[in-house]
Image: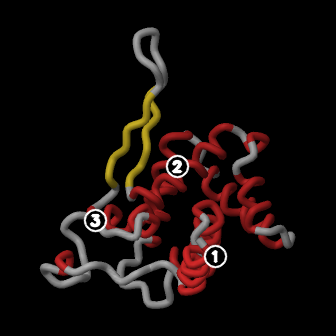
Amino acid sequence: MSDNSIEKNMDNFIGLSAVLTGFSTEIIAPGLDVVDIKSEYLPFFTKTVTEESGDANLVNNILQEFASLKNSGLSDQQIGEAMLSLSNGDQFVLACRKLIFMWYSGAWPTIIPATEDKPASTVSNLISAKSYTAGLAWQVMQSHPMGDSNYRYGYWATPPPHSVPTQVKEHNDEKSSEL
């Protein structure tokens, strides 16, 4: 695979990941990227999807479909809906859904089918320590993983800065004064 092809695959992977997770490409692949989790995720995604599906072209087909939809001028919402459309086939959609799971949790899901005795279930395996701390779920929760923080020891002893936007606070203050 040529360097240009590898770069194009990474660009499409970043774009697809942003569309499917709802995070911007600047979050998925920041300009100054010391963690560089995308470089761990793309090969892992490619290898694992290929092994699970038995289709050596599936990841390439997913990335090409994303690129085609992006070039057609559709909105991110429309692209996401098209990528998750059942008309793409079960393996295609499942791979896209597992990609979302991977970005949010830093783990890879395994679906265990239902049996006569047990309902279907999903278990997950952590990809790496780095993937655990880079999971998007931490950003959604405005939190950090246990044992991994950029704050100094004891930061929890002081209240966090107020995160309610000023306009909302002023609006609420006006409402309470009317009562």
Near-viewer residue (5 or 90): 90
Question: Which mark is in front, 2 or 3?
Answer: 3
Q: Residues within 10 Å of mark 3 (few under 14, many from 20)?
A: few
Q: Position of residue 167 (x, y in %)?
A: 60, 85
- At 60% from the left and 69% from the top, the residue drawn is 18
Please give the label number shown on residue 98: 2
Residue at the limit of the structure toward the front, as seen here = 179
Placement of the C terminus among the 4 image quadrants: bottom right
Q: Position of residue 164 (x, y in %)?
A: 49, 78
Q: Residues within 10 Å of mark 2 (few under 14, many from 20)?
A: some
Near-viewer residue (48 or 160): 160
- Quadrant of res 148: bottom left
Q: CA distance from mark 2 to mark 1?
A: 21 Å
- At 62% from the left and 60% from the top, the residue drawn is 20
Local secondary structure at mark 1: helix
Q: Is residue 6 visible?
A: no
Residue type indicated by callout 2:
Lys
Local secondary structure at mark 2: helix
Please give the label number shown on residue 8: 1
> What residue would you read off at disc 3?
145
Side of 44 relative to 173 (left or right): left
